[in-house]
Image (cartoon, helix red, strand yellow):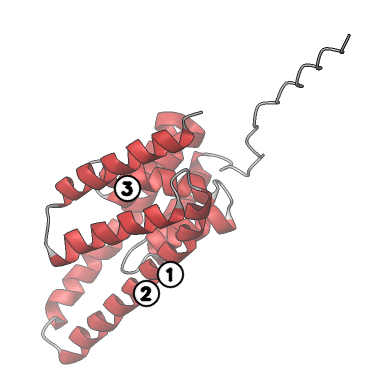
């Protein structure tokens, strides 16, 4: 008589690694204020570097997931992302504190700079400086995209398919000037279906 096979040991549920978190609402406000003040030409590169790599409040995969949601929500993407990060730790109060941090001080500075810029906007040196800053901003965004792309290797969707979806989005937006909402609905819906099929047991 053969022995019956032993039952497989239960698989322990996956636990989130312990990560640092903001100490208080003030810490959240100050952190996002400093992030915003460093974000010349776009704060995405800075917020990814600070939240993921320096403060380690979230993993790169979590950042990409929340950034994806922030992009399809109405309103400025970075403000949406800041509110989502703040809400992760302190709920509604955290969301409002993060939003205030990313808007309050930069708003005052921008208003002051706007007054100064109005006086010197016609100067060739000022126009050249702005073109140089635009090039730096484009480089920062490209570098952030490359850093975030590492997480695609562990995505439920195969890497080649992710690249194809990204390339299709670029072609539709840059060459065919397709409406952003249509591209998001079409490619985003496709990505959701493929991810669901990839995660399906």
Q: Which residue is drawn at 41% across and 57% down?
A: 160
**Upstream in sequence: badge 3 or badge 1:** 3
Residue 199 left/right relative to 73: right
Foreground residue among 116 and 196: 196
Disc 2 and disc 3: Cα gap in Å?
21 Å
Q: Is residue 34 visible?
A: no
Foreground residue among 134 and 13: 13
Residue at numbered disc 3: 79
Tell me whether the residue at label 1 lies in contact with that at label 2, contact meaning CB atoms closer than 8 angstroms.
yes
Q: Residue at x 13, y 79 (%)?
A: 119
Res. 189 image quadrant: top left
Residue at numbered disc 2: 139
Instruction: Return the mark for residue 17.
Output: none
- Element under label 3? helix
Residue 97 left/right relative to 14: left
Disc 3 and disc 1: Cα gap in Å?
21 Å
For the N terminus, the image quarter is top right
Judged by depth in the image, the label closer to the viewer, 2 or 3, is 2
Q: Residue at x 44, y 57 (%)?
A: 47
Residue 64 left/right relative to 57: left
The tally of labels here is 3
Residue at numbered disc 1: 143
Judged by depth in the image, the label closer to the viewer, 3 or 1, is 1
- Element under label 2? helix
């Amino acid at each position: 008589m053969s022995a019956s096979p032993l039952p497989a040991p239960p698989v322990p549920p996956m636990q989130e690694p312990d990560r640092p978190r903001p100490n208080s609402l003030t810490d959240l406000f100050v952190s996002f204020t400093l992030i915003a003040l460093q974000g010349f030409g776009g704060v995405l590169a800075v917020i990814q570097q600070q939240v993921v790599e320096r403060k380690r409040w979230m993993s790169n995969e979590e950042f990409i997931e929340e950034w994806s949601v922030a992009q399809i929500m109405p309103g400025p993407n970075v403000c949406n992302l800041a509110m989502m990060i703040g809400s992760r730790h302190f709920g509604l109060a955290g969301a409002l504190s993060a939003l205030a941090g990313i808007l309050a001080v930069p708003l005052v500075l921008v208003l002051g700079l706007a007054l100064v810029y109005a006086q010197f906007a016609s100067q060739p040196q000022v126009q050249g400086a702005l073109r140089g800053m635009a090039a730096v901003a484009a480089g920062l965004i490209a570098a952030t995209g490359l850093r975030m792309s590492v997480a695609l290797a562990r995505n439920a969707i195969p890497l080649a398919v992710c690249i194809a979806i990204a390339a299709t989005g670029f072609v539709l937006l840059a060459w065919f000037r397709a409406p952003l909402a249509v591209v998001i609905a079409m490619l985003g819906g496709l990505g959701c279906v493929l991810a669901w099929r990839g995660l399906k047991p």
